[in-house]
């Protein structure tokens, strides 16, 4: 349409902006993010419980970002899995395992930090390999396979620990509470994880292959890709991000309990954030920047709800509505594109 | 016309293709046989394919063309026989092995990723990289180089998203992908089926360029006109056997048609309708059309079976779907029982007592995991108020009706609670039939009613269809099997290129039908006009 239009007819400013964004592959979810941000400011201005606007308050803004770290890291991993047209429901349980494992193994001793972290990452890799093997070799549906693995992890954990076990040393809590200048270290870590995720997905062969496997396993296989390996690797990456999230959570709480992962709803919310970010459940499209926006949307909503004093149940209802709206919007859009 | 075309194409490439051949075949098939349960799909077939030559493989539906292509491309392994590539015997376990060896195949359904760019698609799995990081600059250059070899660099940008391209452009990307594997042999399955007229010209030019590079091109086509335009050599398959391979300049189209048909009619078919059996007009189409169809004129009366013949892609199924409201007509008029009516949805058609036995019973006709009785009652239950047949789920009347219908169509199963997925193809089809009996359909459309059904059950289905007509139903029966169309129909209409190109009386010959169905009649008519 634009190609045929005469040069005299300049596209509108909105049209040009839209084209600019499209040329740079900016996920449409950033539109939603901006809208929600504006709505949050307006709501805060009219209904806020204190006089100050949260947008002007650096503590609150930082808080929004810190709130995003735990979910954000694991959501990057979930994005990998979902780009490959799979899903991982075991992440919440793996986060619990990591949190409890870290506080138990470290037992407040700074000297035990490094090998504990190493052990936990190995655990993550093993869980990822198990998930991937079940799905790609035994051909078990990913929903069932990862749910099963998750339940096994929970069983193992509950059989061993009933409550908070041990604690992490103060030095390890720097991960959650330390800052470099005004920037919290944890936010920096989240940003680095997203950046790494983007680089792998969009700049490396592995990413290209993962999109192919998710887009059409048949096409990928006929092009000579080892689709099983590609998808298993995605599950390993996802489990590793879950471990990282678990480490952040325990660093914040000082001690891990068996319920921290599941109470944080990291399984369903990481999927929701990924889907809101524009990664299709059917795989083959999407990316980590979209997912980051999805996570930020959740954080802004939470912060705003706190600011204007909406109760916890209402919060859940609104979150649910936003997930449905976002996905409905994508479906509508892709139908419109197909004509 | 074909003559002049041929000299123009062949001259620079292979001056004397057929007689004194000093070129060795790049690909040779020797005595290849491939069996599937109940059918010999390829029976001792031997063909040679030469570099720089376009070789067409033609035949009726089910003649074995697709099987041969899949054997060549490594998708099937032959039961016996040898495939030689450059003289050496080869065995492929997977299409990617054939591709690596230089044999690429382009299916009608493209093997491309719509969400990825052109360059990512062409070099998928072979991206130029440094330590796993893709060198996008080189990827784009390499893609451009491949496109340039096809002289398509102006047509397609390497960075364009594949899903945004037209079907013709996507086909060029497929060809570019094949070429990037250094294909020596390129197989194309019905490459022109999805293309518009001017796009076919682009493809033709492309094929000639590939030919000039010494690539052997094998293409399957139903369109004989194109076969004669493009190919230097043609192989005719029939019932899994090779009838002949000949240079196109030495044969005529009618000779090819003759070779494609001519099977002995040995099956038994029920008696046809007598003139007094044929009743009132049930369905009339005049000038009807939509995206896939044009200028359809058709009359269908109660008590008769009208057979629809035509090759794949001729619009047979589109016609059934248009009548039934799946893909409604957008122009022209439709009349049922004398009043104007156009179905916009299948529900509307069912309410007007139309029934549609689809080509694909497993996905469109049945809910495989449900028992026989639920399948039979499916449509009636969902629309019972509209059909005003009073009954209730789970009552004795409901069960009795299902049993009665199952008996009427002769479903053979251990019990009515048997899941349909465990029935034979023939019995499954009978369940579909019973489903439409339940709604008391007066106009029935059958699309490939006996596909994949064994001989005995076939005869039984044929008998049931005729019984329906005798009971006053109007039947439209689409079939790829010419003996079936000829044996069953009271009249035969032949489709080609989205329209009805002719009507033949009961008992017309296979050759007459094939002449119409291959578009041969159309093209000769055009030639007459131009002379």
Image (tube, coloured by chain):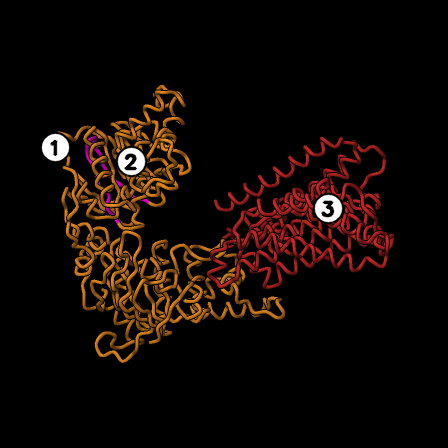
Quickly name the residue at label 2: B412
- Label whose residue precedes the other's in the sequence (1 or 2): 1
Label 1 to label 3, Cα distance in Å? 81 Å
Label 2 is found on which chain of the structure? B
Left or right position of A94 against B462: right
Tell me where residue B137 appears, x and y as whole percent: 58, 68
Label 2 SS: loop
Q: Which of the two marks, 1 or 2, is nearer to us in this view? A: 2
Q: Residue at x 25, y 47 (%)?
A: B495
Near mark 3 (Cα within 10 A), the count class, few <14, some 14-19 or many ≥20, is: many
Residue A30 visible here: no
Residue B468: which quarter of the image? Answer: top left
Q: Residue at x 36, y 54 (%)?
A: B196
Q: Nearer the viewer, residue A333 or A225?
A: A225
Residue B307 falls inside the magenta stretch:
yes
Label 3 SS: helix
The magenta region covers B293-310
Near mark 1 (Cα within 10 A), the count class, few <14, some 14-19 or many ≥20, is: few
Cβ–Cβ under 8 Å for marks 1 and 3: no
The chain letter of the red chain reads A
Cβ–Cβ under 8 Å for marks 3 and 2: no
Label 1 SS: helix
Q: Which mark is residue B275?
A: 1
Label 1 is found on which chain of the structure? B
Apparent colour of chain B: orange
Q: Nearer the viewer, residue A145 or B392?
A: A145
Q: Which mark is residue B28?
A: none
Quickly name the residue at label 3: A96
């Amino acid at each position: 349409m634009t190609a045929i239009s005469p040069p005299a007819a300049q596209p509108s400013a909105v049209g040009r902006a839209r084209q600019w964004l499209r040329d740079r592959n900016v996920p449409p979810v950033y539109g939603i993010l901006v809208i929600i941000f504006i709505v949050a400011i307006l709501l805060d201005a009219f209904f806020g419980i204190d006089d100050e606007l949260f947008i002007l308050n650096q503590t609150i803004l930082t808080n929004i970002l810190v709130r995003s770290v735990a979910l954000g890291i694991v959501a990057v991993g979930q994005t990998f899995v979902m780009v490959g047209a799979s899903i991982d429901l075991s992440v919440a349980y793996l986060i619990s395992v990591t949190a409890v494992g870290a506080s138990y193994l470290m037992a407040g001793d700074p000297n035990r930090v490094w090998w504990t972290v190493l052990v936990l990452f190995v655990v993550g890799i093993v869980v990822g390999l198990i998930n991937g093997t079940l799905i790609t070799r035994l051909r078990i549906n990913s929903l069932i396979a990862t749910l099963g693995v998750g339940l096994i992890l929970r069983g193992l954990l509950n059989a061993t620990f009933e409550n908070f076990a041990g604690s992490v040393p103060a030095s390890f809590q720097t991960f959650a509470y330390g800052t470099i200048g005004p920037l919290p270290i944890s936010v920096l870590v989240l940003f680095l994880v997203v950046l790494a995720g983007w680089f792998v997905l969009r700049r490396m062969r592995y990413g290209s292959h993962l999109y192919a496997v998710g887009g059409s396993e048949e096409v990928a296989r006929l092009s000579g890709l080892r689709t099983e390996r590609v998808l298993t690797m995605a599950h390993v990456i996802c489990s590793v991000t879950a471990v990282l999230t678990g480490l952040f959570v325990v660093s914040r709480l000082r001690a891990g309990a068996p319920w921290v992962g599941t109470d944080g709803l990291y399984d369903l919310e990481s999927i929701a954030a990924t889907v809101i970010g524009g990664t299709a459940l059917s795989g083959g499209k999407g990316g980590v920047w979209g997912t980051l926006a999805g996570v930020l949307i959740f954080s802004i909503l939470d912060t705003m709800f706190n600011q204007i004093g909406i109760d916890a149940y209402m919060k859940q209802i609104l979150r649910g509505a936003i997930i449905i709206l976002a996905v409905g919007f994508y479906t509508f859009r892709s139908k419109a594109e197909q004509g | 016309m074909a003559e002049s075309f041929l000299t123009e194409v062949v001259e620079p490439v292979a001056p004397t293709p057929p007689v004194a051949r000093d070129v060795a075949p790049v690909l040779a098939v020797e005595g290849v046989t491939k069996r599937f349960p109940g059918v010999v799909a390829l029976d001792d077939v031997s063909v040679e394919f030469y570099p720089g030559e376009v070789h067409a493989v033609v035949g009726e539906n089910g003649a074995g063309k697709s099987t041969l292509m899949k054997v060549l491309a490594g998708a099937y392994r032959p039961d016996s026989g040898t495939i030689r590539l450059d003289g050496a015997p080869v065995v492929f376990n997977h299409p990617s092995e054939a591709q690596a060896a230089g044999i690429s195949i382009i299916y009608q359904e493209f093997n491309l990723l719509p969400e990825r760019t052109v360059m990512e698609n062409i070099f998928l799995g072979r991206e130029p990289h440094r330590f796993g990081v893709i060198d996008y600059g080189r990827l784009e250059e390499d893609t451009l180089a491949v496109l340039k070899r096809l002289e398509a660099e102006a047509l397609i940008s390497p960075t364009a998203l594949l899903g945004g391209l037209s079907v013709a452009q996507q086909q060029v990307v497929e060809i570019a992908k094949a070429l990037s594997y250094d294909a020596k042999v390129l197989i194309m399955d019905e490459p022109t089926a999805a293309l518009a007229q001017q796009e076919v010209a682009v493809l033709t030019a492309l094929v000639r360029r590939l030919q000039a590079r010494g690539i052997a091109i094998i293409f399957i086509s139903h369109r004989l006109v194109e076969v004669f335009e493009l190919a230097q050599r043609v192989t005719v398959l029939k019932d899994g056997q090779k009838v002949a391979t000949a240079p196109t300049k030495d044969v005529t189209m009618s000779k090819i048609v003759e070779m494609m048909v001519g099977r002995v009619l040995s099956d038994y078919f029920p008696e046809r309708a007598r003139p007094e059996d044929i009743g009132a007009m049930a369905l009339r189409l005049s000038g009807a059309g939509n995206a896939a169809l044009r200028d359809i004129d058709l009359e269908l009366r109660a008590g008769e079976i009208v057979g629809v013949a035509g090759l794949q892609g001729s619009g047979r199924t589109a016609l059934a779907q248009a009548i039934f409201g799946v893909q409604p007509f957008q122009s022209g008029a439709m009349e049922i029982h004398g009043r104007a009516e156009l179905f916009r949805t299948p529900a509307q058609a069912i309410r007007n007592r139309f029934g549609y036995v689809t080509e694909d019973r497993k996905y469109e006709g049945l809910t495989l995991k449900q028992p026989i009785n639920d399948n039979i009652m499916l449509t009636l239950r969902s629309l019972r108020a509209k059909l005003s047949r009073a009954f209730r789920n789970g009552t004795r009347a409901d069960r009795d009706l299902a049993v009665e219908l199952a008996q009427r169509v002769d479903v053979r199963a251990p019990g009515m609670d048997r899941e349909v997925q465990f029935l034979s193809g023939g019995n499954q089809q009978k369940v579909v039939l019973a489903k439409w009996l339940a709604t008391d359909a007066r106009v029935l459309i059958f699309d490939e009613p006996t596909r994949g059904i064994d001989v005995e059950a076939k005869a039984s289905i044929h008998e049931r269809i005729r019984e329906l007509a005798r009971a006053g139903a109007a039947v439209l029966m689409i079939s790829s099997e010419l003996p079936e169309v000829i044996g069953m129909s009271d009249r035969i209409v032949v489709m080609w290129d989205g329209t009805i190109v002719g009507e033949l009386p009961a008992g017309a010959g296979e050759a007459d039908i094939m002449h119409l169905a291959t578009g041969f009649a159309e093209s000769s008519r055009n030639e007459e006009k131009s002379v």
